[in-house]
Image (spheres, grey):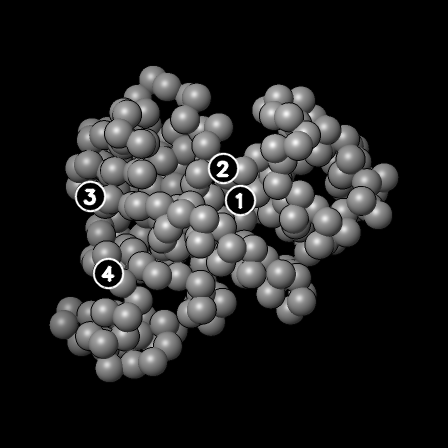
Amino acid sequence: MIQIQHISKAFGKFKVLKDINLELKGGECVALIGPNGSGKTTLIKTILGMVVPGCGDILFSGENIKHKWAYRNNIGYMPQIGQYPENMTIGQVLEMMKDIRKMPENSLDVDLYNTFKLSELLEKRMGTLSGGTRQKVSACLAFLFNPKVLILDEPTAGLDPLSTEILKEKIQKEKSQNKLIIISSHVLSDLDDMVSQIIYMQEGELMFFKSLEQLKSDTGTNKLSKAIAQVMSDQNQSN
């Protein structure tokens, strides 16, 4: 579904991405993991077309995304911190996005809207919301337009345990419908029962891309957090 071919990016002399090659398919839930400054956010932004790579290509469903924008209608993006007009209400933000995307009401995915009971909060202004409620709005918008691809950046940050489980169940449901889901998160314990593949980046380089089961087998661990800790420990010892 998404092919990343020899992508590199530099800001001045600082190389943020170094010859990244990936092929991501539908029906996979992929964890994008790495230390701060490893290039995860820049990689996400290149897929979204927000950052233009210095070289290389990104193909979405076989078509190069260069100088194109329509492919983004097939991507649902949940940022780490949602930025919205502070004076607008939740209802106004939702209606604004519906007007921009122009998708028929009967085609919208309202699972999270209903489960998070956002209908009871429509008059609340964005500037008054708690971090958790703002996160629910971001999650609802990411899934609302039935995208083929979901890119979720720290999706459970600020959510209470019940809301976290609701979101995780929704992610599993979308994965079962052959959608591609990419999750960037430092809360590795939330990823164990969701992800099927692991991308690990460090200093702009792709260190590995493998299945969760293979990673656990390679490290002799039974949890993602332990596996990544083992990988980091091995790297520190080799340096």
The x, y position of residue 79, in whole percent, is: 53, 44
Q: Nearer the viewer, residue 43 or 10?
A: 43
What is the total number of numbered labels drawn onto the structure image?
A: 4
Which residue in the structure is indicated by mark 2? Answer: 147
Query: Is tag 4's residue or tag 1's residue first in the polypeptide sequence?
Result: 1
Q: Is residue 190 above or below residue 142?
A: below
Which residue in the structure is indicated by mark 1? Answer: 79
Crowd class of label 3 (few under 14; some 14 to 19; many from 20; radius 10 Å): some
Residue at 35% from the left image edge and 61% from the top image edge:
196
Q: Nearer the viewer, mark 3 or mark 2?
A: 2
Q: Is residue 28 visible?
A: yes
Return the mark for residue 112.
none
Crowd class of label 4 (few under 14; some 14 to 19; many from 20; radius 10 Å): few
State the SS at label 1.
loop
Quarter containing the C terminus? bottom left
Give the Cα distance between marks 2 and 1: 15 Å
Q: Is residue 15 above or below residue 219?
A: above
Residue at 25% from the left image edge and 38% from the top image edge:
3
Q: Amino acid at mark 1?
A: Pro
Q: Amino acid at mark 2?
A: Pro
Q: Quadrant of residue 123 in the image?
A: top right
Q: Amino acid at mark 4?
A: Lys
Q: Amino acid at mark 3?
A: Asn
Which residue in the structure is indicated by mark 3? Answer: 21
Residue at 31% from the left image edge and 46% from the top image edge:
25
Query: Is tag 2's residue or tag 1's residue first in the polypeptide sequence?
Result: 1
State the SS at label 3.
strand
